[in-house]
Amino acid sequence: MTSNTSDAERLERTADAAKRLREAIRRVVVGQEDVLDAMLVTLATRGHTLLVGVPGLAKTLIVSSLARALDLSFGRVQFTPDLLPADITGTDVLQERDGQRSLQFLPGPIFHNLVLADEINRTPPKTQAALLQAMQEREVTVGSTTHALPRPFQVFATRNPVEQEGTYPLPEAQRDRFLLEIQVDYPSADEEREVAIRTTSSAAPVIEPVVTRDELDAITSLVPRIPVTDEAVDLAVRLVRATRPSSDGALDDVKNYVRFGAGPRGSQSLVLAAKARAALRGEAAADVDDVRALIVPTLRHRLVLSYRADADGVDATRLLDRIRRHIA
């Protein structure tokens, strides 16, 4: 079997696995197709996701259902103002056995494959920062000992965009570690009617594992090897550079409303996410259409806007739409 044939088979299996996952999640989640597609992109890239939406839009249900469909362990951390870093990572506890005392590490809820960081903006930056090492190096250091996290390990954080009292902004370094920021919107009228019927008439259906860990490993290994056209890479770089007010040819809106644009990690994430989107659809290469489709969720959370933007009611989504129209 030639390498080309092998790659074609891997792509076909990847698309089939994505189809099985979508069908499994649809058994318990009504609508939110775009949200699920974006989450599959982050899953295929071993990335992390920030889900933004008001309560009650099935954010937790989607993540827990995804874990069940993949037969992965699921952990949930409810972020509150009094949460401490040790409540997330774990801590050393003193134990006595046979008259001997010793320190033993007690793992925190972060030691799972898929971790839901619920309402991450409700805890101070010091506690939020407890996730930084975990998200980047897939390990945590407690005391003088470093502990490896399970593989795979991915964080799905949620943020309520409405409530501001008792919340804290996410540090820029942490926002940059999220591959995508996914906006979770209200369902349509028909979808909301279906939700009302399903959740009040019978027990929720049970999701059985539909994709094995070996299949998931094969997908995450395949994505970096997916070819990407030169035009797609050039477009990704130009889009990211266009978010920086100091760049040559930056739009007036960018100069007026953006303090800091996306860094090089934005370009890397946009290209990688485009590869994942292509692979999940069974496409042999990522192109400019894949990049265009992921501009907003990949770059939205990486822009630091000015006070003037807030005063004028200009948000990152609107700015990125203008940049996309100008460049893409």
Image (cartoon, rainbow, N blue to C red):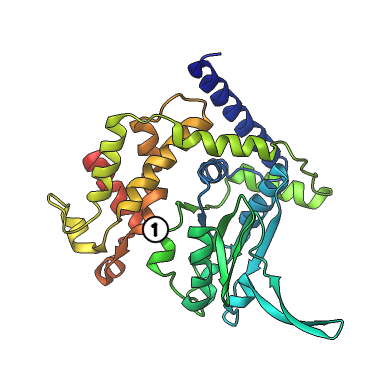
- Quarter location, residue 244: bottom left
Using the image as rendered, state which of residue 199 and residue 80 is in the foreground. Answer: 80
Q: Quadrant of the N terminus?
A: top right
Could you say where residue 257 lies in the image, as x and y percent from the top left? 23, 63
Residue found at x 28% / y 31%: 230
Residue 52 in sight: no
Could you say where residue 70 lies in the image, as x and y percent from the top left? 69, 43
Residue 101 in sight: yes
Residue carrying label 1: 301
The amino acid type, in three-letter code, at marker 1 is His
**How many badges with numbers are in the image?**
1
- Quarter location, residue 293: top left
Q: Quadrant of the C terminus?
A: top left
Residue placed farthest to the left in the image? 248
Residue found at x 57% / y 76%: 85
Could you say where residue 99 lies in the image, as x and y percent from the top left? 85, 86
Mark 1: few/some/many CA within 10 Å (<14, 14-19, 20+): many
Using the image as rendered, state which of residue 204 and residue 4 is in the foreground. Answer: 4
Using the image as rendered, state which of residue 191 and residue 100 is in the foreground. Answer: 100
Using the image as rendered, state which of residue 194 and residue 119 is in the foreground. Answer: 119
* Residue 76 higher or lower than 205, as above or below: below
In the visual, does 2 lie left or right of 27? left
Could you say where residue 48 lies in the image, as x and y percent from the top left? 51, 54
In the visual, does 172 lie left or right of 74? left
Residue placed farthest to the right in the image? 98
Q: Secondary structure at mark 1?
A: helix
Residue placed farthest to the top in the image? 1
